[in-house]
Amino acid sequence: MKRMLSLLLVVGAVAVSGIAADKKVTSPYTIVTTCTMVTDIVAQVAGDKAEVKGLMGPGVDPHLYKPTRDDLTKLAKADVIFYSGLMLEGRMADSFMKMARASIPAYAVTELLDEEFLLEPEEFDGHWDPHVWNDVQAWISATQAVAGALSELDPANAAAYQANSDAYTAKLAELDAYAKKSIATIPEKSRVLITAHDAFNYFARAYGIKVMAAQGVTTESEAAISDINELVDYIVENDIRSIFVENIVSDRNLQAVIEGAKAKGHSLEIGGELYSDATGPAGTYEGTYLGMVDHNVTLITRKLGGEAPEKGLYGKLSPAH
Ligand SMILES: [Zn+2]
């Protein structure tokens, strides 16, 4: 049943773009986006041709986000809508369908990713894992999807969108290489990333680190005591010293893990906070997609015993890495 639902939604998303295929916009126009990582790449590609309004602020959990009345007004007034897709914004699906009926073009930025790329871990119950942005290559694809969509809608500015996308993609490629190089410096036995919820499967595959989470797929599921006990046993056996909290999830489950490890005489610390499903504070470097990933990679690398510059790839991270 769940599998059928995801298929329907995927087909729905394709149909949404299909309906709007002949729709055109004229600059300046308004784009409405969902989560901060989507807002950032859309703003990078749109440049000065459109106003971009993000519905979810930094630190907001996209799995649980329900559109407010004000959001619905913004969506209804949008010329174009971009969302992440793969059911990340689970509680916004109805709104997207409504906008599609109103013939507002809505694009999932993940629509160019094929099944070969996508992961479907067992605990995801037949759904694709939506956390693709934690592999920078996927966000390169997403940036290109945005450029393609805007060029179709506003052909007069297609060259500008392509140039913006190319310039930004070059930075993302640099970030991807930095992530690969940094994570590889962590001693092999310590290359284990333990977080609050299951957001780093693509990160794990792309950068060569094992991941484990105290809580399942979406932030809605509760961690079972047996899962926490298993995690504690793994940590003690493998002498893991740092685990990581996330900006969008309560650290209650991780505190239980720390207490459990302590009870077995093992000292374990919170290595810091990762930006898992939303960027850091608006107006800071960490509030951009580049800064979000740079922060995560640099913090994970340094706390697990690898080598990365304290202030990250561009020397822009705030202190305490
Ligand atoms: Zn998540």
Image (cartoon, rainbow, N blue to C red):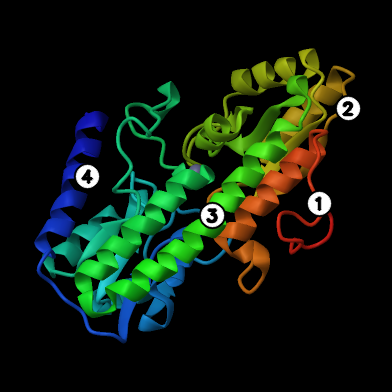
Distance from disc 3 to disc 4, alpha carbons, whole Å, reads 29 Å
Residue 172 tag number: 3
Of badges 1 and 2, the one in the foreground is 1
In this rendered view, identify the residue nearer to me: 206 or 109: 206
Q: Is mark 3 within 8 Å of ligand 1?
A: no
Q: The N terminus is located in which quarter?
A: top left
> Which of the numbered marks, if any, corresponds to residue 9?
4
In the image, residue 223 sits, relative to residue 96, either above or below, namely above
Q: Earlier in the sequence, mark 4 or mark 1?
A: 4
**Which quadrant would residue 101 be assigned to in this image?**
bottom left
Q: Residue at x 27, y 59 (%)?
A: 107
Image side of residue 71 versus residue 1, left or right: right
* Up-down relation of residue 206 to residue 278 (above or below): above
Answer left or right for 20 relative to 50. Answer: left
In the image, 147: left or right of 173? left
**Quadrant in the picture for residue 49:** bottom left
Determine whether the residue tagged by mark 4 lies in a helix, strand or loop.
helix
Measured in 3D between alpha carbons, the distance from the residue under mark 1 to the one under mark 2, in whole angstroms, is 21 Å
45 to 259, vertically: above or below: below
Where does label 1 land, which residue? 321
Disc 2 element:
loop
5 on left or right of 115: left
Check disc 3: other Cα within 10 Å, few if <14, some if 14-19, many if 20+: many
For label 2, the residue is: 267
Type of amino acid under label 3: Leu
